[in-house]
Image (cartoon, helix red, strand yellow):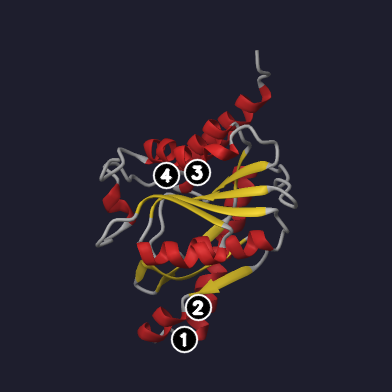
Amino acid sequence: MPERFRDRREAGRLLANQLGRYQGRDDVVVLGLPRGGVPVAFEVAAALRAPLDVFMVRKLGAPGQEELAIGAVASGGVRVLNRDIIKRLKIRRPQIAAIAARELAELGRRERLFRAGAAAPAIAGRIVILVDDGLATGATMRAAVAAVRRLKPAKIVVAVPVAAREICTQLAAEADELACVLTPEPFYAVGACYCDFAQTQDDEVTALLAAARDAREVPDP
């Protein structure tokens, strides 16, 4: 097992090795968290021969420290807050409301862009594999799990290439299953575990979703 992934695509292929029991099932859907989770999810979905879509979720960054998550918002109006960080940084409610409003607007923009008018995938009664490129605070994934849970899936699997060990423990209690390739100690940052951690762009997400749809429309020989 490598100490670092070459890029998100390699991380996705290694992650898929832990999910082989879901390969070829018609009740599985893979949902990538935009944007960085989609290249990882693309490889997972391809390996499992499962449909790929996105699940819209946005991190709430701390004022002046946008990479530090104080929470997240997700489709369906779900908001998850990291109250310990909020208290430590003395962030006030109006600030949180303003950040959440801005991120909800961006969430809506991306949902329209990535889906191009298509309906969200059916979730009820299916096994949902939620994929991101890594977990630092876990706030984004926690919001996604809470939002998906409202849609009554049969099972929620959180799948990530790398995460802080304590965050894995927390997410394992909130999801039905957790798959993770690397849990480095000490954990510094998700990006430190990738050789190439360039920001994923909107056009890359759109292209990967289109490629996944096209691949599933080609009948098996």
| Sequence-wise first label, 2 or 3 | 3
Secondary structure category for the residue under label 4:
loop
Determine if residue 169 is in view: yes
Q: Is residue 22 left or right of residue 179?
A: right
Q: Amino acid at mark 3?
A: Val
Quadrant of image for the C terminus: top right
Quadrant of image for the N terminus: top left
Near mark 4 (Cα within 10 A), the count class, few <14, some 14-19 or many ≥20, is: some
| Sequence-wise first label, 4 or 1 | 1
Q: Give the residue at mark 3.
A: 38
Foreground mark, 2 or 3, reads 3
Q: Verify CB contact (< 8 Å) between mark 4 and mark 3.
A: yes
Label 4 – label 3 distance at C-alpha: 9 Å
Label 2 – label 3 distance at C-alpha: 27 Å
Secondary structure category for the residue under label 2:
helix
Q: Which mark is residue 96?
A: 2
Near mark 2 (Cα within 10 A), the count class, few <14, some 14-19 or many ≥20, is: some
Near mark 3 (Cα within 10 A), the count class, few <14, some 14-19 or many ≥20, is: many
Residue 220 vs 23, above or below: the answer is: above
Of residues 23 and 210, which is closer to you in this image?
A: 23
Of residues 159 and 67, which is closer to you in this image?
A: 159
Residue 51 vs 129, above or below: the answer is: above
Residue at 42% over, 81% down: 84
| Sequence-wise first label, 1 or 3 | 3
Query: Which image quadrant is residue 69 in?
Result: bottom left
Label 1 – label 2 distance at C-alpha: 7 Å
Residue at 50% over, 62% down: 172
Q: Give the residue at mark 4.
A: 200
Q: Which mark is residue 92?
A: 1
Q: Amino acid at mark 4?
A: Thr
- The total of numbered circles placed on residues is 4
